[in-house]
Every structure is written in C-alpha cells, then in structure tokens.
Amino acid sequence: MKRRFPLYAKILLWFFLNLLLLGLAAVVVVGSRVGLDVLLAGYSSDRIRGVTEVIRTELRQRPSSEWDAVLQRHSDAYGVKFLLFRIDGTHLAGEAISLPPEVQEVFSKLRQAHRLIFGRDIPGSSPDKLGEGSPADGDLKPLSISLQHRRFIVRTSNPTRYWITIPAVLGLQKDDQLGLAMLMIMSDSLDGGGLFFDVTPLIKAGSVVVLFSVLFWLPIVRSITRSISQMTRATEQIAAGRFDVRVPAKRRDELGQLGEAVNSMTKRLEGFVTGQKRFLGDIAHELCSPIARAQMAVSLLEQRANEPGRIYVRDLREEIEHMSGLVGELLSFSKASLGETQVKLQPVNARDVIERAVQREIQLGADVRLTMETGLTAAADPEMLQRALANLLRNAVRYAGTAGPITVSGCRDDDTVLITVTDCGPGVPEESLQRLFDPFYRVDNSRTRETGGVGLGLTIAKTCVEACGGSVVCRNRNPSGFEVLVRLSAISDHD
C-alpha cells in the first residue's frame, strides 16, 4: 500500500524549511566579511564601547607595568583576549601574539588615513619609543575626536579568529607623554563570549517568531485539511455505494466549490442508481408473469410429449427454472436496494434469526456449525437479516461445502454485534476481494450455472445488512479459508 504524506505535514514542513533557509541565509550574511560590521552595530556596539572605555580609563590610571594584569582580568571576565599594540604593530600589553597580515593591513590603512587628514604621521608611531614625536595637547584633541568612534573588525583563517581594533589615545606614564595605541579584542568564535554577538536574544526572538507563525498558520492549515478530510470521507462512502452523503459547502474558496461539485455529483449519481435499480426491479417484476406462463406451458407439454420428446422438454424446463431463479434474485436485489430508506429497525434476537438460516442449509445436507453467545440483540429488520445470512451461507456451501465444516459464530464487541461466517475453502484471490459485493461480479467469468450463481448473492447480503444500518467485510484466512464479517448495532437489555 502506498504511504501517504498528509497535506497538513507538508505545509508545516514547507513552512519550517522556509525558516531554515532564511536562517541559513542570515548566518551566511553575518559570517561573511561583508556582514561582520553587523557586530559593531546596535547593542553590540554599546557593549563594546562601554567595555573599552572602562579599559582605557583603567590603563590611563595605572602604570604600564600593570597593563598586562588589567587586560588579563578583563579577558578572563569576558572570555576573549584584550591586547594593546602600537599603531605600527608593536606589542605593548596583553598576551604576546603576532598580528596576522589582515590586521596589520588595518593598521597601515589607519596611518595612511591620518596622514591624509593631518599631513603627518600619527603621534606615538615611532618604532623606537612610544613617546617620541608626541604632539602638544592641542594636536591630540582633534586626533582623539577623529578616532574615538572608529572601530574595525577583521576575520582571519587558520585558525578562525575575529579581531576588533579600537584606537585608544592613552596618557602613558613613561615620560608623562601622550600617544596613540590600538586596543585589540580577539575571539575564537563569532559571539565573542556574548560581547560581540549575544545569541540568546536571537534564540528567544526566533522562538517567539516560530511560535507566532505556527499559531498564525494553524487555523488556516487546519481549516484546509479539515475540508479535505471531509471530502475524502464523503468520496470513500460514495465509492462504497452510499449516495446520500453530503459535504459541508460553506467555504467561499476553491475547496467550497469542490464541495458543491461533490454534492451535485452525489445527488445525480443517487438519482441514476436509484432509477437503474427501480427499472431493474420493474423489469424483473414484469418478467415474472411470462415466465410463470412458460412454466405452466412446459408442464402441459411434458405431459403430452412422447418419451423422446420429453428429453428436450426437460431441458427447456431447466432453462426456464434458471431464468425464474435469476428474476427472483433481481427482485430481491431491487427490493433490498430500494427499501433501505423504508426499513424500520427493531430489536432482533440474532441467535434466532441465524438458527433459522442455518436450519435450512442443514436440511439440504450441508455441514454447518453454530457457535453463538446467548442474549445477542441487534438493531435490524428480521426478514432482511435472515435473507442476508441465508445468502452468505448458501455462497459458502456452494463454493466450499466439500472442503470442511462451515462455522457461523456470533459475539458482542462493545456496542456492536459481530456475526462471522467462515468456511474451509481455497479462499478468493486478493485482487478480487474488493469487488466481491459488486452486482453480477464473478471471480471466474467462465463459471456455469452448475459451478456458480449469477453474481448477486453477496450483493444482496451486503445490501440487506446496510439497510439494517450495518456493514459487511470479507477476508481470506490463513492458511486457507474464507470469512465474511457482519457488524450490526447492538441493543442492551436496558435500552
């Protein structure tokens, strides 16, 4: 059986796939070189500005011999490494790390930019002594203003690291001279211990977005799948021959139009099938009179014919009797089909009805065994239920009567009376099980009247049971045998 993937799950899967693709796109943008500036905006910028301002202030207030301890303390606190370099790349404080070429290029661009602005090198850029060439206080003021808000972020590979470079104008204690240094923040991860990029708010925001989206999509998705489920159940009942089913068609979209189309189709099919059954019943009824007259004529002809002629008369009588039996089956099928809406259900003792049906077959020589619970009461029409069980027994006797005993059992299952007719025959091909109850269907189309009926026995049984509000299913048994199960509504003693 082909596995089904619910539309409900498909829509939700598509929705979450859309979110996943958006998330991957966001990660690519943030993780690329072009998107790294996002780390220096918004709340991340405020956090970095606050931390670096505290470090700058503390470095200005302490001698250079204590700078390593200051940077190490802040590094341990934030899970990143704080480093201090000269503008030319000379290490001043923090862990001694060689600057990768990408970071050195930032230093070079910064010196060039200042040279274009001020027409000279940045103070404190001498490789020999940080204080040499230091400007007067008037020169440091525009320098501080031009650089204090400038930050640069670089990503390097092998190993992957993220570097944030922040110019820092420091009052160096050595020789009481001022100079420009570069405060570096180095992290092995994109979040920088929460200093660069705090993923917790994003996770919370993403969870809220997902929850809101699910709640927002849920009503419409549920509405669509509910309508589809209703139409699926309706079409399954239509395929089973129930043409009185209707689909709610209150929607004003394509599904509503489809529901109206299903209702219109069902109504027309009901009219066609009812008309066909009524026509079939009328024809069968009309055929009864000429067949009866033909039987009477054949009886008279048989009395007057000589011995050689009686052989042909007997053959003719057999054909007429076969025709009469066929017309009788057609009448029974027509009455059961058209009488479904006219049946008045009543409490019926299931054992009594089954015993009457079994007794007839036993009298014909069949080996039928009855195992029934006592006190089984079902809602049914006695005549129709007996006709249905008689046809089921007759079918079992006809095709499996010589293979072993035929067992009729009955029990109560919750609010259902379950009646089972089981034989020991070879069973039915699996591909034919779904069509056994179709009118005039035969497993073997080459069967003659000696090996099978006209294909209406099981159809009449199914129609009679459904007229009583029940259902009939059949299945093969392992290793051999065939079983028909009849389900009827049970009636309790206190009902």
Image: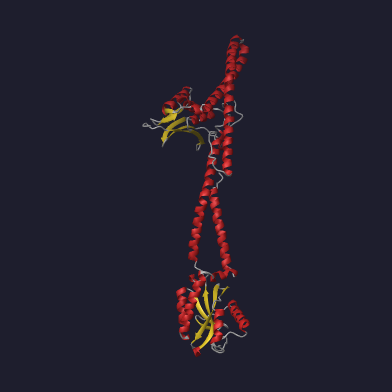
Residue 368 sits above or below residue 259 on the image: above
Name the residue furthest top. Answer: 304
In the rendered image, the quadrant that contains the N terminus is top right
Residue 158 sits above or below residue 478 on the image: below
Query: Is residue 341 at all visible to an observer of this figure?
Result: yes
Number of numbered tags placed on the structure image: 0
Residue 111 sits above or below residue 405 on the image: below
Tell me what residue is drawn at x 56 percent, y 42 percent.
256
Nearer to the camera, 154 or 349: 154
**Quarter of the figure with residue 444:** top right
Name the residue furthest left. Answer: 494
Nearer to the camera, 436 or 426: 436
Locate residue 390, reporting x and y percent: 49, 26
**Quarter of the figure with residue 89:** bottom right
Locate residue 437, reporting x and y percent: 54, 32
**Quarter of the figure with residue 39:** bottom right
Locate residue 416, reporting x and y percent: 43, 35
In the rendered image, the quadrant that contains the C terminus is top left
| Type of colouring | secondary structure
Query: Is residue 480 at all visible to an observer of this figure?
Result: no
Q: Is residue 268 left or right of residue 383?
A: right
Locate residue 143, reporting x and y percent: 56, 82
Nearer to the camera, 435 or 228: 228
